[in-house]
Amino acid sequence: MTIGIVGSGRMGQDLFYSFMEYDCQVILVSRNPEQIEKIAKKTRKILKRDPGLMGKETPIITDKLADLAGCDVIIETVIEDLAVKQDIFQSLEGIAKNTCIFATNSSSLDVTDVFCGVKAKERCLGLHYFYPLKLISTAEVNAGPDTSEDTVTEMVKFLLMTGRKPLVLRGENRLVLSKLLISLAAYAYKLSLDGELSLNELDQITKQVLLFGIFEMVDSTGFPIISQCLTNLPDKLHSTLYKPLLLEISDLMKQGKEGRRGEGLLSLEDFRKRDPAFTGSREECYEKYGIRFLAFLLNEIARYMEDPLLDNKQVQESVEEVLGLSASLKALYKELKEEKLLETLKAEYKKSLDPLFLPADLKVYGEH
C-alpha cells in the first residue's frame, strides 16, 4: 500500500513517522523547503537507528503533488482553510489513480464543503486524528452524503492495519468528538464568566475528570484552529454557548496572540478582573463547579448517543479515550447520581432558559 500525506505541519509529520512503522510506502508532500530538509534529516536518523525499517520501502519527502500518482490513500493535513483544501483535492483528482481514497484531516470543516469541487465524491471522506497521536488510537471516519460504503470499508481496514480504532460517523454528528471537545471548552469558559473562579482554577477542576485541563487543550491547539472550530462546528443548539469564547479568542488574535508559547488563555489571564464572591468554602465552590462541568459533559454525550446512526458502545469508548476520562462514562454517571445530574441541569436551564441544558435521555448510562 502507498500512502500520501499533503502538509508538513505537526499532524502531517506525526502521521508520516507513524506510517513508517508499517509495511507500506509513505510519501510526504510539503511546499516548505526548510521543512523538507528537516523531515528528511530526521527520517535518515530514524532509519539509521532502527535497521528493521530499512527493509521496507524508503519514505519519500517531496514538493510535488504529482509524486502521489500511485497512492492508494491520500491524507490532507494542511491549515483549516477551505479554499486551500478544495484546491488541493481538485488538483489531486487529475493526478491520483481512480481507486485512490481522498481523506481530509480537517477538525472543523464539513466534508461536503471540502470535496464540493471533486467529481468522484464517492471516494472522499474525513479522517480526523487526535493529539497526541502516540497515545490516542481513535480516528474519526467522517462519511459524506456521497461517500460509498466500499470507501468507508476500505478506510476502516486501513485504520486497523495502521493500529487505529475507527469511529465511523455520518449525518449531522460528523466530527462529533471535535464538537464535544469544543463544547466543553466553551462551557468551561461560560463558567468562568460567573466570576467566582479563574480559568486556571477551572482548568484544575476539569483535570479531575479529564486527562488534561480544558484550557490547556485550547492553548496547546492554538487560537487559529480553535477559532475555526468555534465558527464552523456550532449547530443551533450550541451557537449561543460558543459566542463568548469565540469573542475572547478573536480579540486575542487581533492583538497578535496565537495561543501556545506563553500566549494562551491561561498565561494571559488577568486575575485583577476577578472579584470572587464565594458564598461558601473554597472546597464547596470547587465541588459546585466540578458537578456542573460533569453534568454538562454527561448530558452532551447522552444527547449525541440519541442519534440512531451512531454506535453507542463505540462512541463511549472513543470519548473515554480521546478525553482521557478518569473513569468510564457509566462510572461517572453512577458516581454523580441521576438525581444530582438532573437537579444541576434544571438549575442551569432555569437560570438561562437555554434548551442546551434540557436533560437528554440518560438511560444510555444505565444499560448493561
Image (cartoon, grey):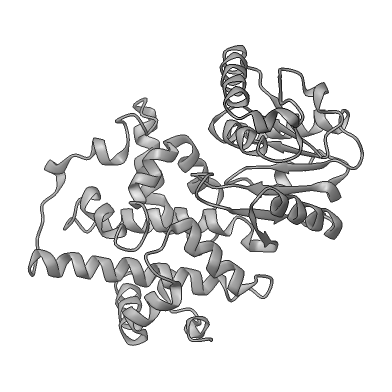
Q: Is residue 355 visible?
A: no
Where in the figure is residue 351, as x and y percent of width and height? 29, 72
Q: From the viewer's perspective, tell me whether residue 298 is left or right of residue 368.
A: left
Q: Quadrant of the N terminus?
A: top right
- Tally of numbered tags: 0
State which quadrant residue 99 falls in: top right
Which residue occupies the foreground of this view, 171 or 140? 140
Q: Residue at x 35, y 35 (%)?
A: 251
Q: Residue furthest front?
A: 51
Q: Is residue 196 above or below residue 269?
A: below
Nearer to us in this view, 316 or 110: 316
- The residue that appears at 53% across and 53% down in the rendered structure is 178
**Would residue 37 be found to the left or right of residue 168 on screen?**
left
Residue 196, image x, y percentages: 16, 58
Between residues 86 and 33, which one lies in front from this camera angle? 33
**Residue at x 71%, y 45% (from the top left corner):** 113
Furthest-right residue in this view: 98
Please tell me which residue lies in front, 73 or 19: 19
Q: Is residue 188 left or right of residue 141?
A: left
- Residue 260 visible in the displayed image: yes
Q: Residue at x 36, y 29 (%)?
A: 257
Residue 60 in the image, given as x and y percentages of width and height: 72, 23
Q: Left or right: 322 with respect to 256?
A: right
Q: Quadrant of residue 222?
A: top left
x and y percentages locating residue 148 in the rendered image:
85, 56
**Is residue 77 depicted above or below 322 in this figure?**
above
